[in-house]
């Protein structure tokens, strides 16, 4: 009897300790995470300048969402964001993987090569945006001067509606592809060497080895890279704000940038929140995957 | 006729294709190196160009054809950039904000990971799923309500406004919880039997064993918040409170076409990061590689 009561008491004490430990985290989440989530779901149905008293917020029902559907600037921004994300994600995957395969073949100096490719990752994006605005300068920027030196036609880069968004993509790929390369390298290194040996004995060439061993075994890494890259690039803001402010003629306007302008320049917090909510539809599929990856305990390695 | 397996292939047949492959391998090897080196040049040139341009006059920066090196070093660019961005103050602000957030994330991440990964309490798994489900909500979706919350708490233009919403990250809790699986329960139980409290276990056992996790968490949190332009633009309007990214965007808007000044400002912003990267290069890259793999 006594021992049983002792164990009961211990279990109770343990449960209490656990709850006490978790309590500060739960309180914090309630105020700073769940609160804002609920607030943003509510704000979609309101119009508010964000500065008057809360009572000045006006309930508008579905007006915000209706307005979004017919707002050409927002729809353009949405389309730009999707194009930007598609270009950046696919380039990160392809170039990141090719670089990883190449660097993996390097025997001597691999650490140095890896560090050089990783280098732009650590540089602050705001500083790099300033820098690339200069590199892209049509009259005297480095890129156009190099282009004319090798006899290629000059380009307008950030100053043409056709190339502006892609120019920003190019900068971002330059900036972050090293990160994905390192992730791919870790995935490649985790594949046991014996698999390749076995394939070589069976007479498989380099391409066949890649097709039938590396690629299938890298699938979890690929998924991870796509998910992370998509979530990041759909939220693009800094390079737009620094380099173009959405110009020329809204060619580089993106949802998060336009949301920021709508809330803080036009003082329409409800409308801005509705923009965020509609971008959530595009990003949700990826965050759902991320959630599932996390729940299963992260990316599997071999 | 039966031929034993190992006799079926003549030794010559294995050697012969290899002999043919030697020049081919040389070609692919050279091709590989050309590819890698061209890529490396492309990675390095922009940074070098920024550094060189930061010492040039405006006419030199905009010279056609290219001027590789400045005629003489124009330190004046830095003086103006420092004055416009209030650089020492911005650097201090950035260091304070990012360090506090990083430190808090390490503490709360390991704390939460311990509470959800090692302690046993009723309702734990449900609560954890609820917390984890918030990673489905990207930051931009709640950025406006969080700004309004900070406004309501009178934290605009304060360090508090920059720091308070980011004290706890789900990623850190998750990472540590996964890592807890590698720490045997017996170790924790033995400490309990010896009279160690839960707090003591956290401090003396969990924290020291979480070192690799702490490294990853420090790197990811630090780089993320060192570059927090959007949040900075929302919270900070006073120049003395600007963090580096906001100060740089201010410099860009202030100086417009005076690109040489912007290059000086950009170089200033890069230097602290560069120092950290050169010192911890190996750990940083290892940390990133680890973040993609199962703990």
Image (cartoon, coloured by chain):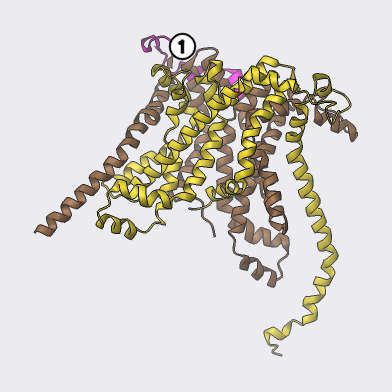
Residue pushed farthest bottom?
B1
Compare residues B15 and B106 and report the one nearer the observer: B106
Indicate the position of residue A211 as horizontal and vertical percent values: 67, 58
In the figure, B103 relative to B23: above or below? above
B149 is higher (above) or lower (below) than A222 = above
> Which x, y percent locates residue A150?
89, 36
Please tell me which residue is depicted at 39% across the width and 29% down the height of the picture. Answer: A32
Left or right: where does residue B154 sit relative to residue A101? left
Q: Mark 1, chain letter?
A: A
Task: Look at the image and tell me in which quarter the C terminus of chain A lies.
Answer: bottom right
**B150 in the magenta segment:** no
Nearer to me, A102 or A203: A102
Q: What colour do you see for chain B? A: yellow
Q: Quadrant of residue B166?
A: top left
Please state, as top left, top right, bottom left or bottom right, where the N terminus of chain A lies in the image: bottom left
| Residue beneath disc 1 | A49
The magenta segment is A51-77
Q: Is residue A140 visible?
A: yes
Residue situated in front as seen by the camera: A80 or B186:
B186
What x and y, as percent, mark residue B244? 59, 26
Report whether A241 appears left or right of B164. Answer: right
User: Would you say A242 lies left or right of A289 here?
Assistant: right
The residue drawn where x is 81% and y is 54% is B31
Q: Secondary structure at mark 1?
A: loop
Residue A87 sits above or below residue A96 on the image: above
Q: Residue A264 at x, y = what percent?
A: 53, 15
């Amino acid at each position: 009897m006594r021992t049983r009561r002792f164990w009961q008491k211990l279990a109770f004490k343990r449960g209490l300790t656990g709850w006490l430990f978790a309590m500060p985290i739960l309180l914090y989440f309630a105020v700073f995470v769940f609160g804002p989530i609920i607030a943003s779901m509510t704000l979609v149905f309101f119009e508010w300048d964000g500065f008057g008293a809360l009572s000045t917020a006006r309930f508008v029902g579905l007006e915000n969402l209706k307005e979004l559907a017919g707002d050409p600037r927002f729809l353009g921004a949405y389309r730009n964001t999707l194009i930007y994300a598609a270009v950046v994600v696919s380039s990160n995957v392809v170039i990141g993987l090719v670089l990883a395969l190449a660097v993996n073949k390097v025997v001597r100096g691999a650490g140095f090569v890896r560090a050089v490719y990783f280098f732009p990752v650590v540089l602050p994006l705001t500083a790099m945006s300033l820098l690339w605005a200069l590199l892209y300068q049509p009259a005297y920027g480095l890129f156009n001067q190099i282009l004319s030196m090798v006899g290629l036609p000059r380009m307008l880069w950030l100053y043409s509606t056709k190339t502006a968004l892609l120019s920003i993509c190019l900068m971002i790929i330059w900036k972050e592809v090293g990160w994905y390369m390192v992730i791919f390298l870790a995935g490649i290194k985790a594949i046991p060497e014996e698999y390749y040996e076995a394939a070589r004995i069976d007479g498989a060439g380099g391409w066949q080895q890649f097709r039938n061993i590396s690629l299938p075994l890298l699938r979890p890494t690929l998924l991870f890279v796509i998910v992370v890259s998509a979530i990041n690039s759909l939220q693009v803001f800094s390079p737009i704000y620094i380099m173009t402010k959405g110009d020329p003629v809204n060619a580089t306007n993106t949802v998060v940038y336009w949301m920021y302008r709508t809330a803080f320049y036009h003082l329409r917090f409800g409308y801005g929140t509705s923009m965020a909510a509609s971008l959530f539809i595009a990003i949700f599929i990826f965050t759902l995957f991320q959630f599932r990856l996390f729940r299963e305990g992260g990316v599997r390695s071999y | 006729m039966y031929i034993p397996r190992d006799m079926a292939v003549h030794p010559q047949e294995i050697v012969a294709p290899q002999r043919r492959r030697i020049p081919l391998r040389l070609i692919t090897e050279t091709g590989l190196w050309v590819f890698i080196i061209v890529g490396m040049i492309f990675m390095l040139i922009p940074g070098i160009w920024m550094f060189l341009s930061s010492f040039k006059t405006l006419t030199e920066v905009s010279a056609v054809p290219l001027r590789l090196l400045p005629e003489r070093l124009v330190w004046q660019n830095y003086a103006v950039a420092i004055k416009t961005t209030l650089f020492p103050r911005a650097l201090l602000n950035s260091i304070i904000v990012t360090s506090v957030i990083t430190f808090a994330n390490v503490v709360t991440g390991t704390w939460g990971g311990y509470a959800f990964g090692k302690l046993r309490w009723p309702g734990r798994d449900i609560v954890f799923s609820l917390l984890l489900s918030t990673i489905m909500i990207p930051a931009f979706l709640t950025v406006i309500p969080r700004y309004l919350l900070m406004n309501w708490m009178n934290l605009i233009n304060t360090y508090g406004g920059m720091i308070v919403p980011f004290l706890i990250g789900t990623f850190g809790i998750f990472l540590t919880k996964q890592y807890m699986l590698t720490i045997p329960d017996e170790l924790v139980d033995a400490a309990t039997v010896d009279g160690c409290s839960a707090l003591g276990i956290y401090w003396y056992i969990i924290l020291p064993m979480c070192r690799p996790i702490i490294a990853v968490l420090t790197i990811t949190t630090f780089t993320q918040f060192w570059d927090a332009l959007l949040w900075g633009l929302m919270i900070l309007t006073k120049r003395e409170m600007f963090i580096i990214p906001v100060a740089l965007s201010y410099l860009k808007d202030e100086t417009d076409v005076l690109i040489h000044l912007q290059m000086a400002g950009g170089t200033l912003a890069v230097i602290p990061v560069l120092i950290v990267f050169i010192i911890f290069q190996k750990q940083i890259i290892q940390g990133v590689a680890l973040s993609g793999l199962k703990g």
